[in-house]
Image: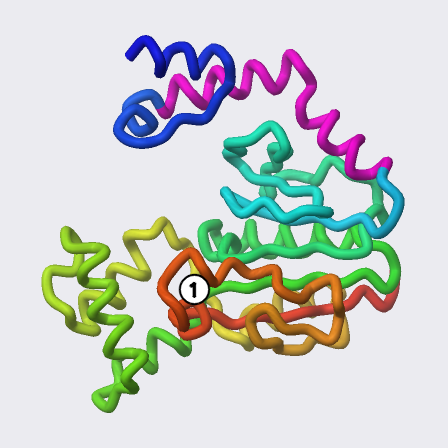
């Protein structure tokens, strides 16, 4: 307990059972520290003062990418700025060349997701690009089909083992329900829905890409495939990129 309190006061992240027990206090202390020491302003200033492209990473979690302005609603590092995507982003118009988000937009309501994409359009420069990777509704539909690939079968077995409380049997029905409800997901997109959100915001030249692949060098090798067993993130996900071609 003493070490946990010390970590709280010093702003040092800690993990394990102590993290869950002290989470509310931890977040409050972290927020106070960030305000007192103006952590977010410092992180923003440091990134925008660098030479080269300005790149915004939304909902980074623990996946901090070098060369990007990493942001999250609950940042666990003082290298990450706190950003609430439901509000106006704290940046001027036409600030960034690139924006990226991986497996975050599904955790916010659809209307907030649209606001986030609109804000990305605003803060991107003319010719700037947005890349979003998110779970695919088509993946869940395919997972329910009677004929399954070996990868789908292994995914169902893995999900049951990883989520035993909510997936008591390695069965597609339980896995799908768990995926939709128990990860805090708010809206599961398919390509046409996310494409429509891009278009409403003003993006054009919208293309679908494979994970970690892009015609744009800045968007290659960004997705964190190592966070779950090999092949599973590709099975779950799809990626769209769009370009700001008009003010």
Residue sticking out furthest to the bottom: 147
Q: Residue at x 37, y 11 (%)?
A: 5
Magenta range: 23-49
Of 79 and 183, the residue lying toward us: 79
- State how many labels appear: 1
Q: Quarter of the image holding residue 137? A: bottom left
Indicate the quadrant containing the N terminus: top left, top right, bottom left or bottom right: top left
Give the farthest residue toward the left: 168
Residue drawn at the location 63% of the way across and 17% of the way down: 35
Depth check: give the residue in front, 221 or 195. Answer: 221
Residue to which mark 1 is pinned: 188
Residue 202, position as x, y percentages in the image: 76, 65
Q: Residues within 10 Å of mark 1 (few under 14, many from 20)?
A: many
Q: Position of residue 247 (x, y in %)?
A: 88, 59
Q: Tell me if 168 is positioned left or right of 213 in this view.
A: left
Q: Residue at x 55, y 31 (%)?
A: 77
Q: Is residue 28 above or below residue 54?
A: above
């Amino acid at each position: 307990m003493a070490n946990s309190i010390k970590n709280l006061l010093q702003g040092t992240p800690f993990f394990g059972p102590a993290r869950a027990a002290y989470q509310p206090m931890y977040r409050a202390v972290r927020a106070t520290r960030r305000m007192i020491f103006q952590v977010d302003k410092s992180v923003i200033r440091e990134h925008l003062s660098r030479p080269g492209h300005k790149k915004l990473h939304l909902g980074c979690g623990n996946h901090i990418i070098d060369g990007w302005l990493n942001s999250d609603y609950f940042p666990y590092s003082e290298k990450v700025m706190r950003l609430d995507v439901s509000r106006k982003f704290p940046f001027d118009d036409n600030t960034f060349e690139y924006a990226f988000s991986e497996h975050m937009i599904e955790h916010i309501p659809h209307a907030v997701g649209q606001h986030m994409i609109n804000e990305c359009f605003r803060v991107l420069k003319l010719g700037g690009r947005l890349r979003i990777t998110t779970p695919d509704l088509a993946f869940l539909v395919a997972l329910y089909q009677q004929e399954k690939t070996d990868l789908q079968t292994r995914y169902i077995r893995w999900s049951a083992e990883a989520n035993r409380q909510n997936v008591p049997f390695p069965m597609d029905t339980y896995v799908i329900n768990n995926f939709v409800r128990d990860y805090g997901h708010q809206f599961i997109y398919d390509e046409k829905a996310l494409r429509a959100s891009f278009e409403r915001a003003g993006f054009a030249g919208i293309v679908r890409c494979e994970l970690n692949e892009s015609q744009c060098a800045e968007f290659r090798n960004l997705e964190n495939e190592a966070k779950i067993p090999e092949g599973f993130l590709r099975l779950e996900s799809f990626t769209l990129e769009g370009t700001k071609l008009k003010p």
